[in-house]
Amino acid sequence: MTGLAGIELEHPVLNAAGTCKSPRDVEAFARSAVAAIVVGSITVAPRAGNTGTVYWPGGTFSVNALGLPNRGLDEYAEQLPRMVEIAHEAGKPLIVSIAGFDVAEYRHMAEVVGAAGVDLIEVNLACPNVWDGGAQKRIACFDPRQTAAVCAQVGAALDALATAGGGRRVPYGVKISPFSDPAALAELADVLGRAATSGAGPGGPAFVTAVNTFPNALVVDAAGRPVLDVELAGLSGPALKPIGLGQVRQLRRLLPDTVALVGAGGITNGHDVVDYQRAGAVVVQAATAFWNRGEDPTVFGEILSGWIDEADPDQFAAADPA
């Protein structure tokens, strides 16, 4: 057994946000090998996502520009209790990823999602593929002040829910983009570390998911035409793994031990899981391997089997820092 933010997990293999959006999806993942089910990302307003071709699968890398398609917070407020029930009946915790476009939206979503009985919340500060009026929205994690404000408001909302209900406080974490500037990554880690260890303010993040796709990649076909309709997209798949590993290693050195790390980026087999654990991650998430297999959730069982073959589970079942 391992754990994340006080939640026990049977093993370290999870799906990543973007792969599971509906109760039917939750049912499929409940039958899969994942140790916990990640739903979302969800937004306050319903979103159709980007139009045209939004995913291109490659051998060494893939690109996607989904644009956060989801049914919106009102519908999820109705559906999440049933999603939680399905996951728990299968012995799996449910994690929900939320993505806001301002600080107030993040707080509102934390209030609604936190009241639905979910086990953990992942605050998506890293989506690079959201367009509005012909321009990309800023990636939140690259703004330390906005990141601090989001953490403060999400933490305050979840603290208030626990106080009002007299029950368990839902832990949350944040998902970030890759940082090529080590000073900028250190600045972000300082913001997250201060939020996590401040005894006077609202509770801070219990984990960091590193990393989301590498933003603004361009892939062209033999005729020089972009393979995706929006042209620029997030790069994922095996090519992202060395970047993800580097981010996890740096963050493990920068963040307090109380903040766990979730590794993401280029995980296709059990050896990749071991590599992320050696870099400092407690658990991992995968999405591209799932999409490149035609959205077949049995791929998580293959990754898990490979991890069991590659590693001694007792050796890599890291103690939950929470």
Image (cartoon, rainbow, N blue to C red):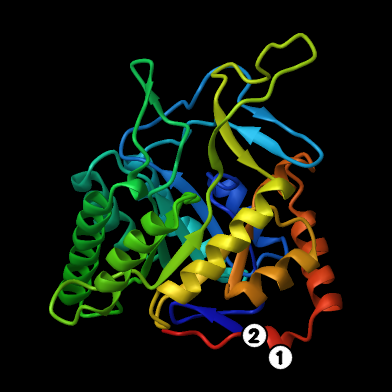
Say which quadrant the N terminus sits in: bottom right
User: Which sits in the foreground, 291 or 168?
Assistant: 291
Depicted 9 relative to depicted 221: above or below: below
Left or right: where 230 falls relative to 77: right
Residue at the image position 71 percent from the left and 70 percent from the top? 275
Q: At x 33% / y 45%, what residue is drawn? A: 140
Residue wearing tag 2? 317
> Cβ–Cβ below 8 Å for labels 1 and 2?
yes
Q: Amino acid at mark 2?
A: Ala
Q: Please, is residue 82 above or below residue 40 in the view? A: below
Residue furthest to the right in view is 309
Question: Is the C terminus in the top left, top right, bottom left or bottom right quadrant?
Answer: bottom left
Could one spot residue 28 in this view of the protein?
no
Disc 1: CA contacts within 10 A as few (<14), some (14-19) or many (>=20):
few
Residue toward you, 4 or 131: 131
Residue 314's disc is: 1
Q: Position of residue 276 (x, y in %)?
A: 65, 69
Q: Is residue 224 above or below residue 195?
A: above
Residue at image point 48% right, 27% down: 49
Could you say whether the residue bearing mark 2 is in a helix, strand or loop? loop
Q: Amino acid at mark 1?
A: Asp
- The image quarter containing residue 223 is top right
